[in-house]
Amino acid sequence: MSFTSVPILDLSEANDPATKPEFLTQLRHALLEVGFLYLKNIGEAEELFQDVISLGKSFFDIPREEKLRIEMKNARSFLGYSQLSAEITAGEIDHREQLDLATEHALPTEGSPGTTTCTAPTSGRQRR
């Protein structure tokens, strides 16, 4: 994965049949090769979008001790805060600080649909 700038995609191009195929090509590249992107011309929600960006940036100004209260390593999911330089990626220290958010859902209980792991033969037995 190598890139020199964050991909900027124009969401209005997704609504035009003439530009939609190229938009989808760029979107696929951004998601699979870069991992993130910036969307512009998102429509009526522009003010809300800017508020979310501003609030997101302000999170990183909160004192470290406060951010550590929601540290990812203490969560039962991959959501929460990761400290600067606290992770290793491809054998190297990953110099990033991040906050992963999502809508909270109850954790599945044993036997819930879609939660059974794959099985494979092991010494003549099936393991779960």
Image (cartoon, rainbow, N blue to C red):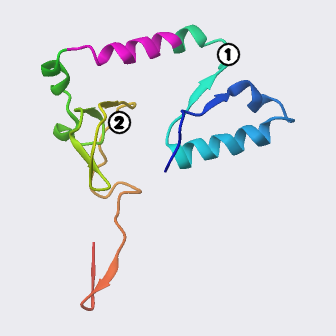
Q: Residue at x 81, y 35 (%)?
A: 19
Q: Callout 2: few (<14), some (14-19), or many (20+) C-alpha neighbours within 10 Å? A: few
In the picture of the structure, the residue carrying the numbered disc 1 is: 43
Tell me which corner region of the image, top left, top right, bottom left or bottom right, holds residue 80: top left
Provide the secondary structure element on which disc 1 rests.
Answer: loop
Give how far across and how far down residue 91 sits, in percent.
Answer: 27, 56
Please state which of residues 17 and 58 is positioned toward the viewer in this rendering: 58
Distance, label 2 to label 1, CA atoms, is: 29 Å
Q: Is residue 52 left or right of residue 26?
A: left
Q: Quadrant of the C terminus?
A: bottom left
In the picture of the structure, the residue carrying the numbered disc 2 is: 105
Labels 2, 1: front one: 1
What's the amino acid at mark 1? Answer: Gly
What's the amino acid at mark 2? Answer: His
Give how far across and how far down residue 122 sits, in percent.
Answer: 27, 85
Give how far across and how far down residue 55 sits, in percent.
Answer: 39, 13
Work out whether mark 2 precedes mark 1 in sequence or the reverse, and give the earlier one. 1
Provide the secondary structure element on which disc 2 rests.
Answer: loop
Q: Which mark is residue 55?
A: none
Give how far across and how far down residue 2 sits, in percent.
Answer: 50, 47
Would you say residue 57 sits in the magenta stretch?
Answer: yes
Would you say residue 109 sits in the magenta stretch?
Answer: no
Q: Is residue 67 above or below residue 28?
A: above
Please state which of residues 103 and 69 is positioned toward the viewer in this rendering: 69
Numbered range of the magenta stretch: 50-62
Q: Residue at x 56, y 7 (%)?
A: 47
Q: Is residue 10 left or right of residue 21?
A: left
